[in-house]
Amino acid sequence: MPFRYREYREEPLGADELREVLALLGVGPRDVLRPKEAEALGIGTDVDGDALVARMVEAPTLLQRPIAVRGDRAIVARPETLLRGFLGLD
């Protein structure tokens, strides 16, 4: 199955693209935030919405990964079995 791999540190998501992915996931930015990275960068629970998206754009390691997008659906593909099922490889 053809796919496009995107290295998030070399080609990070922009704010609009990140919002689109969040919409496909059906979640808000806090739901895909990596807690340890957020803590290390001093991002508390008071940061939310657009401010959190902006921080994720600045520091892409804050975002859970990998994220797989296929058509109008997306998943946080961890563990690998989720990705295999999402792609219909099971």
Image (cartoon, rainbow, N blue to C red):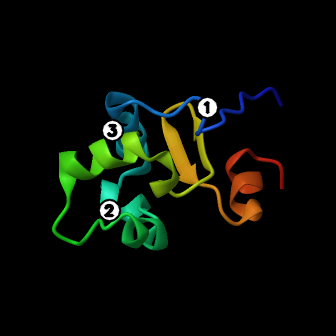
> Which residue is denoted by mark 1 in the rendering?
10
Q: Residue at x 39, y 38 (%)?
A: 18
- Please tell me whether mark 1 or mark 3 is closer to you in this view: 1
How many marks are shown on the rendered structure? 3
Q: Where the N terminus falls, by quadrant? A: top right
Q: Residue at x 75, y 29 (%)?
A: 3
Residues at marks 3 and 2, CA–CA distance in whole angstroms: 12 Å
Of 79 and 6, nearer the camera is: 6
In this rendering, is residue 79 above or below 74?
A: below
Task: Please tell me which of labels 2 and 1 falls first in the chain.
Answer: 1
Q: Where the C terminus falls, by quadrant? A: bottom right
Q: Residues within 10 Å of mark 1 (few under 14, many from 20)?
A: few
State yes or no: discs 2 and 1 in contact (Cβ < 8 Å): no
In this rendering, is residue 80 above or below 61?
A: below
In the image, farthest residue toward the left = 46
- What's the residue type where badge 3 is placed? Arg
Q: Residue at x 35, y 43 (%)?
A: 23
Residues at marks 2 and 1, CA–CA distance in whole angstroms: 23 Å
Which SS class for mark 2?
helix
Of 83 and 16, nearer the camera is: 16
What is the x, y in percent for residue 54? 28, 42
> Which residue is denoted by mark 3 in the rendering?
19
State left or right for residue 8 relative to residue 49: right
> Which residue is denoted by mark 2 in the rendering?
30
- What's the residue type where badge 2 is placed? Arg
